[in-house]
Amino acid sequence: MVRVRFAPSPTGPLHIGGVRTALYNYLFARQNGGKVILRIEDTDQTRFVPGAEQYIIEALDWLGIKFDEGVHIGGPFGPYRQSDRKPMYRQYAEQLIRDGWAYYAFDKPEALEAKRKEYEAQKKTFQYDCNTRMQMENSLSLGMEEAQRRIDVGEPYVVRFKFPNNIDITVHDMIRGDVTMNSRLLDDKVLFKSDGMPTYHLANIVDDHTMEITHVIRGEEWLPSAPLHVMLYKAFGWEDTMPRFAHLPLLLKPEGNGKLSKRDGDRLGFPVFPLEWHDPKSGEISSGYREKGYLPEAVVNMLALMGWNPGTEQEIMSMNELIKLFNVEHISKNGAKFNLDKAKWFQHEYFQKLSDEQVGDLLEAQLKEHDIMADHNYIVKVAAMMKERITFPSELWDTCSYFFVAPTEYNEKDVAKRWTPDMHIHMAKVIEILNTVPFEYDAIHKALLDDYIAANGLNTGKVMNSLRIAVVGRTVGPDMITLIMMIGKDETIRRVQNAIDKLKIEQ
Ligand code: GLU
């Protein structure tokens, strides 16, 4: 039975890199008929940010990444928040000490700082490890009896992992293959503190084991910690059930140099968070995909392809298709560059998948904000016609407003280019034609374009674009005759007359 977990720390809003990690876990679990678990890793209380846990839950829910067990829904392996599991970690730290895999350390921050300085002065870097641990104050250098005495009188301590000297530790990574590191390079990481809180490393391994996690799929930034994790499984005697590891490539800046950061998003105008985030301390607001109008399906599809591909050219994939096609073998080893144009392209594609009725509803809401009431069927018809020009719902008003209200101003550049001094004569003729020919597409088309414009040797672009300026306010929009048919004869005539009056005076 496959069991995977997404294990964020509630230290702020969830970065889209984290969302991608959650998504890959979800896809992998669903594909294998397994379970996906949401565990909150909040052992570092100094980095705790109120609201972050709720944000993570809401963001993943919005994206359709659903969990089988977790902090918000419970489950048979709970609790799923590490601070709620606090009492269970001590016994594991003690087990490691008993078995010679860990030791108590009493070094005060000042003593550690002094050591660091001492090494710096010799142009060396201090590391608490097999070479230095005997110079420090710990149960190895002081003896267990003295250590126990200090603990009994309430001296603060930490528990450190005791890396064996000079052994090669291999992490079998599903994406990278075997990654080997020598223990000489690794420091004796703190696993537990005297306040009863484990550090990330201990809590993470104990929880993965007790929650029966089979695969750890997480960001590449955790690869340097993986040798310690592998050693912890060995030290606990849990090697036979050790999960398999997959470290995902980084999400990179659009230029490809370095990790995608919030600052890149601000600089280039795209969100790096799924939902808008209001920082509780600074009050700063960071934009979110949801508030920008992105559809969750578009975000999911885009993120799925940042670091993975199905092995074909296919780009548009629903969550269900992704579940079918996902495979760890096709996850790239290299970082994936963020591409804003591609993000918008996905959004446009998914916007087109909305029904005319859905787009109509979005448009109707915006019309109401502008105090405009219109027939629902008419709104849906406009939505159907204009949908392909829209990427974000926020564009609806600007793109469609002239179907409902006459322009109040005319684009200056367009007027300067098209509305020549003789134009009022031609526009008066347009009014005359609309008043006399049957109000039908073909009839209007023939009367305007053939019998008037062509027959008099006029410039079609100039006349038709001037008509468009009168009706729309600028030279954009759908087929002109269709537009006239939509807004109606009387309204068209009113707008053309308006333009004649206004633009004549101005000229
Ligand atoms: N709490 C870690 C994080 O915030 C989890 C890393 C892991 O998945 O092991 O990313």
Image (cartoon, rainbow, N blue to C red):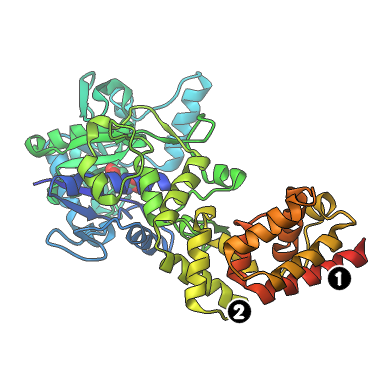
Report x, y in % for residue 50: 43, 64
Q: Are marks 2 and 1 in contact (CB under 8 Å)?
A: no
Q: Amino acid at mark 2?
A: Ile
**Disc 1 crowd, CA 10 A, few/some/many (<14, 14-19, 20+):** few
Residue at 81% across, 60% down: 426
Label 1 residue SS: helix
Res. 398 in view: no
Give me the residue at 38% from left, 59% from top.
59
Quarter residue 399 falls in: bottom right
- SS label for mark 2: loop
Which percent across, then down, holds residue 201? 27, 42
Is residue 24 in view from this perspective?
yes
**Depth check, front residue: 403 or 423:** 423
Q: If you read the primary sequence from the N terminus, does the residue marked by circle 2 or circle 1 appear first?
A: 2
Q: Quadrant of residue 165?
A: top left
Q: Look at mark 2 in the image and give the residue it sits on.
A: 372
* Image position of 499 with respect to 206: above or below: below
Horizontally, residue 178 falls left or right of residue 491, namely left
Ligand 1 within 8 Å of disc 1? The answer is no
State the image coordinates of residue 4 (x, y, percent, origin top left): 19, 47
At 70% across and 72% down in the image, what residue appears? 436
Q: Amino acid at mark 1?
A: Asp
Please say if 25 is above or below 425: above
Q: Is residue 505 above or below residue 173?
A: below
Q: Does 428 sit above or below residue 452? A: below
Question: Could you tell me how far apart the alpha carbons at marks 2 and 1 are, in whole angstroms?
Answer: 25 Å
Which label sits on residue 501? 1
